[in-house]
Amino acid sequence: MLKTFHIGGVHPNDNKITADAPIEVFPILDKVYISMAQHLGAPATPVVAKGDKVKVGDVIGEPAGFISGYVHASVSGTVTAVEPMKDLAGKLVMHVVIAVEGDEWRPEIDRSSDIVRDIKLSKEEILDKIKLSGIVGLGGATFPTHVKLSPPPGKKAEFLILNGAECEPYVTADDRIMREQSEQIFIGGKIMLKALGIERGFVGIEENKKAAIAQMKETGKKYPELEVIILKKKYPQGGEKQLIEAITGRRVPSLGLPIDVGVVVQNVGTALAVYEAIQKNKPLVESVVTVTGQCISQQRNLSLRVGTSFSQILDAIGGIPKDAAKFISGGPMMGKAVSNIDASVLKGTSAFLMLTEEQTKRKEEINCVRCAKCIEACPMGLEPWLLNKLSRARRYDDLEKEKIYDCIECGCCLYTCPSNIPLLDIIRISKAEVTRIMRSRPKK
Amino acid sequence: MKKFIVSPAPHIHSEFETRKLMRDVLIALTPSLLVSIYFFGFSAIKLVLIGAGACVLVEYLIQKYLLHSKITINDYSAAVTGVLLALNLPPNSPWWLILIGSIVAIGVAKMTFGGLGQNVFNPALVGRVFLLISFPVLMTDWTIPESWFRPGVDAITGPTPLSIVKEGLASGLSMGEIFQQNNFSWGEMLFIKMGGSVGEISALALILGFIYLLIKRVIRPHIPVAIVLTIVVLTSIFHLISPEQFTGPMFNILTGGVLLGSIFMATDYVTSPMNPVGMVIYGVGIGLITVLIRYFGAYPEGISFAILIMNSVVPLINKACKPKRFAKEVK
Amino acid sequence: MSIVLFTIICLSVIGLLLAIILYVVSKKFHVEEDPRIEIVEALLPGANCGGCGFTGCHAFAQSAVESPSLDGHFCPVGGNDTMAKVASALGQEVKVQQKMVAVVRCNGTFDNREKSNYFDGYKSCKVALSLYAGETNCRYGCAGFGDCVEVCAFDAIHVDPKTGIPEVDQDKCTACGACVKACPQSLIELRAAGPKNRRVCVSCRNMDKGALTRKACKVGCIGCGKCAKVCPFGAIKIENNLAYIDFNLCKLCKKCVDECPTGAIEAVNFPIKVPKSATTLETPQTQAPQPKVATPIEQKENNSKE
């Protein structure tokens, strides 16, 4: 019996075109544009100025708050500008632009491919190093990893779950690293277990990644503390709350965090980054990105330096494809549409997807026929049609009663709605409004 | 630079589309339609065509000249209403009967509430019940299906099995006598000779449509199963208590449009509950009311009334039965 | 006969019972209310728009009756006439306030602002702008999906399909401020309607540097400060690369309109000037600071008022 979550879910066509394409190292181009907003929370403060010389791994941005992180130079060269530039949504964010000169790394970084298995550092040293290496969750939310690995006082972690579900269609970055660097992922997982002070962990992988499962199971024999669990193919299997339910049977309470049920979830990509940071002294300066879509001819998995712009990738695959109508950073279910293709790749970018107008254009909205398909699809057991109705009437107190704050914005409702009602667009806005109202309320 | 599309996630859409779902309902009705054409010939085709055509036309005229709103006849929902209405009429109905039914179904039961998705009651059933009350003789005078392919034998008109039983009981006959006199056969009821409206001629064809709807994930099985099970349980109890007074479960399931009603009418999206628990409550309610009307009411069959009555409490059911939430309450 | 009797008795008993229940309930749940509240409420427009800052007309009336003076109470919909009536009903004084009107401070029409992408989500400014910077390169401009239109209770604001920018019908606008709150870009401002509805306003909210603004929109304010220098009344301030005209100080001399290099400053409802020479046009590619042409209806009304 394959494990899975039990409420809702949808089955989009997985389109894993690039599953068998090995990760290629993308050449370093003349310039990189490194955003200071690589993580959830406050953007980092740049600590370099125009004209400074930097090597790969030099700190160029320092955290500006508790939930924030370090940013490192991903190339060596001269800083040519430190200025606000448009990010993929057209909003201004501080960027550091570096003109590339050679490829000089900081001397302490071990770039050999030898696998270092001994974990020498202590718990505190590990957490500190993870923070200094600027590691963020690579599953999409880019939450700073060191914060996640330090449970708040009074909460105790019991399990670590490495998320290799990769339930988003098209994206194959995690699939590839599990096939190519499985041992490093296990060592990274072990490091995180040590940082949390716990003994047991799981690796959850969706059934459609047969090769990755085989590879991980094989390597996993040496690491009995991390058990490989095969999950049913169903979206959103890789959603944090769904994954925890599938593997442990525990349900994260409303407005709660995984730590409330004693679980810490980390992406397999994060585990790899942790391995590299702790064992190889290498900060997070590279990102594996799946460049895909039916409208391009060369779908690939690329290992890119953080700060490479989307237009540079497009140049490398032969310009903007003729049929491409939408560029998406991330997968088609939760990824962000790119309105500015000069924006750059972030640490957490997992895919650069191009869809044609036919694939992505929304159809005309018609009346709700109350078919209840959205209820069937919602993995949180909510009633999207009702939330939509109440939202349009701005009935925020009723929305709170209907638990709009539970919504994980997975997109199943909008994906499935036969009347093409933009359910999630509307729910997302009123969810923000409801949580704002709830926060502004004095606490009991 | 080329203009490209930007939108919030998700960026892809499933194959579900309201039009396609409605079209699937029409496809699921084709087996029954073919069987009835086989038995009733031209009159069945005529009724279905007039029904579908009239419903679509009425919707078009109302949207164009009364509401001045967008024309939405291409969503197939009016056509589904028309076909269902036609399948619920006696095969020998005159053309004007279904025309009146269509006007009531679309004009009164659907468009006055605001069109697709807004109506409280199932339009086809409102049309049918309106006709049943206004033209009781025409609506209960069924043709007993005799093969269309045997020339020289005219179709015989007569009442449905349910009304035969009802009238028989009223005139003091015992159940055994009634069954003997009329020579009902289960096999005939299941496959072909089920006296009744155009659509309910063959139980097997209806079940075929049901399976198609389930495979295409158009409907969930909760409602039809709940209705049929309730009727089976209740009628078995009554039948065991007094077999002379109450008909048995098989007889009740196979006659009087229970299958047509529970598969195609009670599962209408707009007028049925949206959550599994609610669907079961709704189905049980329909079954209960149907049995009560059949055994104790004045009408021989009661599923149309039962569905309409339960339609009216659907908003309450939706409010009371929430789906199973993922997250527990915050402690 | 007995049936008739029975019916009559039955109905009478039911009627009596219900009457008693109604009486008890009305006594028990009776709320004492100042009778003046009702009088004041009757004087108010009754739109419950909330433009006064209260939740509705009843709340406004209640507060007006209960507070010692009418300070802080002004019905923007009814205007000075209504307030005078309210004041006389309550035997109090009220200050006369100038008529206000909602002004959309963006002129980024389809012609002036090129679209770089196409938004395909739910057509709402709030949804679009929470996602990204908008369909054009200007991240301060109007998204044109009409969140303001939706909230207007007086049918006074509509998005012009030719320009994509909302237009305020100033005869219908009551300055309730609903659109001001609804606009996620804070583009709409309540400004003095001005004598004969003549106004001068900076139709731009772009706070980017001049070069960026120019790239995004032909008629954006680049914050050059020429208008502030030329203004004889000190009514114009430049902050964050953006000019702002204080309508209380502006005397409608229109010097700034002629000075503005991009045409970001709009003069509304002035009589159409016959161009004497081409001296005002400096650069042909930027739009000349033309006075906004009044629609025939507006013109007619202006004439009749004059």
Image (cartoon, helix red, strand yellow):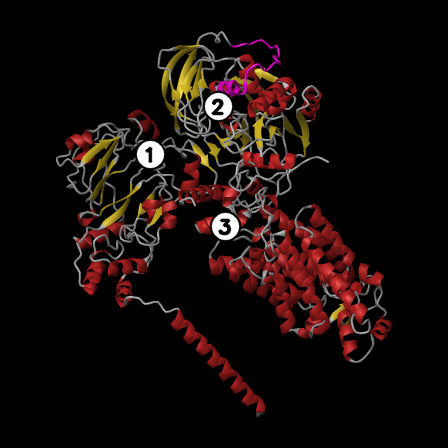
Pointers 1 and 3 within a single chain = no
The residue under label 3 is A401
Pointers 1 and 2 within a single chain = no
**Viewer-nearest of discs 1 and 2:** 2
- Occupied quadrant, residue B296: bottom right
Residue B263 in view, yes or no: no
Give the SS element for disc 3.
helix
Q: CA distance from mark 2 to mark 3?
A: 37 Å
Above-or-below relation of A369 to B128: above
Residue type beneath disc 2: Leu
Q: CA distance from mark 1 to mark 3?
A: 46 Å
Give the SS element for disc 2.
loop
**Viewer-nearest of discs 2 and 3:** 3
The residue under label 2 is A346
* Residue that extends furthest to the bottom in the rendered view of this protein: C1
**Viewer-nearest of discs 1 and 3:** 3
Residue type beneath disc 3: Lys
Q: CA distance from mark 1 to mark 2?
A: 33 Å
Percent of width and height locating residue A275: 57, 18
Magenta span has A288? Answer: no
Task: Give the label on residue C112, or none.
Answer: 1
Percent of width and height locating residue A369: 57, 52
Residue type beneath disc 1: Asn
Q: Please say if the residues under marks 2 and 3 sit with CB atoms less than 8 Å apart.
A: no
Q: Which residues are magenta?
A: A109-130
From the viewer's side, name the closer residue of A300 and B50. Answer: A300
Residue B322 in view, yes or no: yes
From the viewer's side, name the closer residue of A96 and B303. Answer: A96
Task: Give the label on residue A397, or none.
Answer: none
